[in-house]
């Protein structure tokens, strides 16, 4: 039996509903989630949210089983197909995502967070190239928040991790 992963598009905000109904039908389903910072009414909290909004993965052998019921499952918009056949996810993609899960089953968005709060960094790319600052944290999009001093006042800047390097003495 040759099981492959396939992609199912769900209706907006219906990923969990689709997972529940697909599992009830006997399908193996994977909904990767990560922790996202939510700010509301002066409160900040971390909530698990889908890594790929409106998409879930389904494992099946289309040669052996019927995949057509997926199309009419509650919460499902469509099974991603090429022509009239479902398109398999390339081998290793879903396994790679699962390998990045922590003990709570949540996907870590950073392979290695190499910086600690207060580390001295230098901007190496872009318009601020050469500026020195201090690492503050990672934001929701996994970008670095860098505290720079420009024109005599502190400035918080968000940038990709590749745009900074550890400052040399």
Image (tube, rainbow, N blue to C red):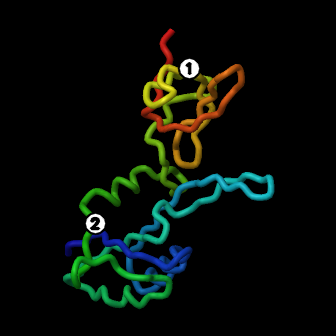
Badge count? 2
Compared to residue 129, the image places residue 4 above or below, namely below
Q: Which mark is residue 153?
A: none
Where does the image place residue 48, in percent across and percent down from the top left?
A: 59, 60
Q: Residue at x 25, y 73 (%)?
A: 87
Whether pointer 1 and pointer 2 mark residues with C-beta atoms closer than 8 Å, the reply is no
User: Is residue 46 left or right of 91 when viewed as pictured?
Assistant: right
Task: From the top left corner, tell me how far across and down residue 1 is, in percent.
Answer: 20, 75
Q: CA distance from mark 1 to mark 2?
A: 43 Å
Q: Residue furthest right?
A: 42
In terms of secondary structure, where does tag 2 sit? loop
Residue 113 to residue 131: above or below: below
Q: Nearer the viewer, residue 106 or 15?
A: 15
Q: Which mark is residue 132?
A: 1
For marks 1 and 2 on the same chain, the one whose residue lies earlier in the sequence: 2
Q: Position of residue 138 (x, y in %)?
A: 57, 39
- Secondary structure at badge 1 equals strand
The residue drawn where x is 80% and y is 53% is 42
**Is residue 34 shown left or right of residue 156?**
left
Residue most extreme to the top: 169
> Closer to the camera, 169 or 68?
169
Label 1 crowd (10 A; few <14 / some 14-19 / many >=20)? many
Q: Nearer the viewer, residue 68 or 157?
A: 157
Q: Residues within 10 Å of mark 2 (few under 14, many from 20)?
A: some
- Identity of the residue drawn at 28% across and 66% down: 89
Of labels 1 and 2, the one closer to you: 1
**Residue at position x 46%, y 52% in the image:** 101
According to the picture, the residue beneath numbered tag 2 turns out to be 89
- Percent position of residue 109, x then y: 48, 48
């Amino acid at each position: 039996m040759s099981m492959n992963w396939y992609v199912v598009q769900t209706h907006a905000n219906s990923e969990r509903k689709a997972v529940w109904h697909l599992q009830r039908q006997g399908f193996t389903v994977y909904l990767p989630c990560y922790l996202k910072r939510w700010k509301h009414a002066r409160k900040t909290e971390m909530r698990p949210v889908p890594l790929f909004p409106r998409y879930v993965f389904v494992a099946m052998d289309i040669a052996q089983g019927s995949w057509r019921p997926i199309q009419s499952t509650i919460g499902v918009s469509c099974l991603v197909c090429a022509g009239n056949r479902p398109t398999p996810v390339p081998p290793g993609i879903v396994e790679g995502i699962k390998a990045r899960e922590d003990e709570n089953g949540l996907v870590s968005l950073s392979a290695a967070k190499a910086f600690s709060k207060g580390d001295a960094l230098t901007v190496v790319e872009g318009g601020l190239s050469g500026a020195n600052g201090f690492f503050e944290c990672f934001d929701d999009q996994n970008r670095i928040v860098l505290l720079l001093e420009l024109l005599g006042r502190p400035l918080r800047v968000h940038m990709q991790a590749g745009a900074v390097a550890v400052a040399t003495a």
